[in-house]
Image (spheres, rainbow, N blue to C red):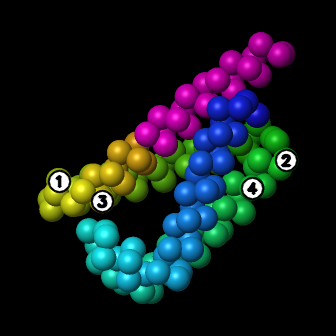
Amino acid sequence: MNKFLRLMFALVILAMLGATVLQLFFPDYMGSHSGYGVAYGWQREIAFWDMAVLIILVAVNIKYDWFYLQVVLLALSVGGICIGTNHLVYFMARHSLINGIGAAENYLLVLGWFIGWIIENKHRKSRA
């Protein structure tokens, strides 16, 4: 796997670890800084989902497999576009800065995934 993709995975893993800790142990803080408010059950579910995704991200980094790497990149991209759009809709309706940042962050991550995907694909073709 190329260095750019490894960096992208490292950034997402760190961000998701941080979000998991914050959602589980500081839900009032997270809820008060989002446009959605505090919802303890949903915030726990987000943290649990993040933990499940983290396992997949770590596995992809430990055992390189081009097919599964592409599946994970596609899933991350679809998730990033959907979550980013959800943030964007709320930002446009309520002008919540946190949701604007969330939209930009998710769209930039998707752009990063596609750049890494293209770089890795070109690497693989040049080695074949």
Front disc: 1 or 3: 3
To which residue does mark 3 refer?
98
Which residue is nearer to you in this view: 54 or 82?
54
Judge the density around disc 2: few (<14), some (14-19), many (≥20) Cα neighbours within 10 Å: few
Q: CA distance from mark 2 to mark 4?
A: 9 Å
> What residue is shown at x 29% (from left), y 58% (from top)?
99
Q: CA distance from mark 1 to mark 2?
A: 41 Å
To which residue does mark 1 refer?
92
Under circle 3, the secondary element is helix
The segment highlighted magenta reads 108-128
**Can residue 42 be seen in the rendering of this structure?**
no
The kind of residue on which mark 2 rests is Lys
> What residue is shown at x 68% (from left), y 24% (from top)?
121
- Contact, mark 2 vs mark 4 (Cβ under 8 Å): no
The kind of residue on which mark 3 rests is Ile
To which residue does mark 2 refer?
63
To which residue does mark 4 refer?
58
Which numbered disc, 2 or 3, marks the residue that appears first in the sequence?
Answer: 2
